Image (tube, rainbow, N blue to C red):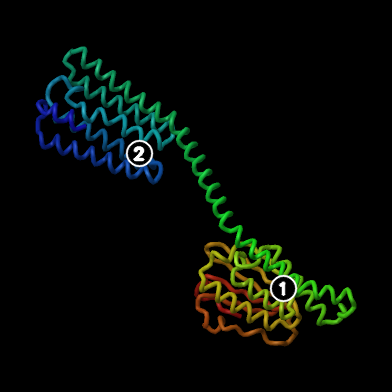
Amino acid sequence: MLVPLLTTLGWVRVRPVAGLLWLALAGLIAVTARRVRRGALTRGEAFALVAVTLAIVVAATANTRGGYIVRISDWPLLVVPLLLAFVTASRPKREWIAALVVTVLLLAVLVLRRHTGQDLVIARLGSIVYGCCVVQIITAMLGPLLRATADSTARRLAAEAELAAHADSTPMIRRERVAWLGTVEQDVLPLLSGVVEGRLDPATPTVRSRCAGQAAAIRRMLTGGGPSSALAELDAVLGDAAGAGVGVEVQRDGDLRCAPRAVRAALADRVGEVLAAAPGGRAIVTILWSPQGGSVFVTMPWPAGAPPVTLGGARGVEPGLGVDVAVDDGWLSVELSWPPPAAGSTAR
């Protein structure tokens, strides 16, 4: 843009105006280039880009004198096709074609109004129109190819990241499985051996409770318990409950690890309090969680007439959790939610 501007200053009416228009067009190019890095132009942005570009072309033409208009206004006319390419790459076919038609018609009107009969002027006008159309056609053809290339690159990077994460997690998974195998050998196999050899009576409540607790622990191992478990801090609490003879059935939809650490710790404390009060030796823990929050439900049989458990969260000790405790038809239900319910809801 700079060399044509300097070589055509002899045909300019007001040189400072020409310099300002040059700076305006350069600024428009910089702003547009920065904007399209964040994504395609919207319809309003594309319309504004075309309108400002053509306004600069009209102003630059009006600031010149003489009939050799194509050569005089060369520097803005050469940039117009490139700016239109941003619209072509961002908008549907009917919109960029409309912008191209308007631009071509405007260029033709500006040149023909001051045409003095020189054939070279018409030839240059044809060259500019041809170049403007070719740039838009090439951009329209390359757009799908570039997007497909970007999609392929994104998939490749995602696959590489997944492989790297798998490689990093494999040693930890092996250590967890070795620890689980040790737990089975130390706790489960002696229990089964005692039952098989007749040293333990499976009909007694104590043995049945131990078997239920070990079965729950094995189920958690098979579904991904441990440091990498989606149950996060709840995994240790559920293991302690199973060790105390409480048969815990876990139902999960979501990953607790996406919750803040303080929230996970508060949930573990509250769930531990509830399971410690389980009178029937069994409980159901349901986790419904997403990156935006969720709920943890603890349900267990509850003696008729017995008051529900009292949690610290219901008294404001854990202001980050919502607590809802209810007893219905011999079942106790405790809901722990985060973020807490909106003002006006009360814990029962």
Residue neighbourhood size for the residue with mark 1, other residues' Cα within 10 Å, grouped as few (<14), some (14–19), many (≥20): many
Reply above or below: 37 against 294: above
* Sequence-earlier tag: 1 or 2: 2
Secondary structure of the residue carrying numbered label 2: helix
Total count of labels: 2
Reply above or below: 295 against 99: below
Name the residue furthest right: 198
Mark 1 vs mark 2, foreground winner is: 1
Tag 1 residue: 248
| Nearest the eye: 327 or 257 | 257
Reply above or below: 17 against 265: above
Q: Is residue 237 left or right of residue 55?
A: right
Whole-percent x and y of residue 248? Answer: 72, 73
To which quarter of the image does residue 47 belong?
Answer: top left
Q: Which mark is residue 107?
A: none
Secondary structure of the residue carrying numbered label 1: strand
Tag 2 residue: 46
To which quarter of the image does residue 173 belong?
Answer: bottom right
Whole-percent x and y of residue 118? Answer: 18, 13
To which quarter of the image does residue 216 belong?
Answer: bottom right
Residue at the spot 23% in from the left edge and 37% down from the top edge: 25
Q: Is residue 236 left or right of residue 105?
A: right
Q: The residue under label 1 is which amino acid type? A: Val
In space, the residues marked 1 and 2 are separated at their CA atoms by: 60 Å
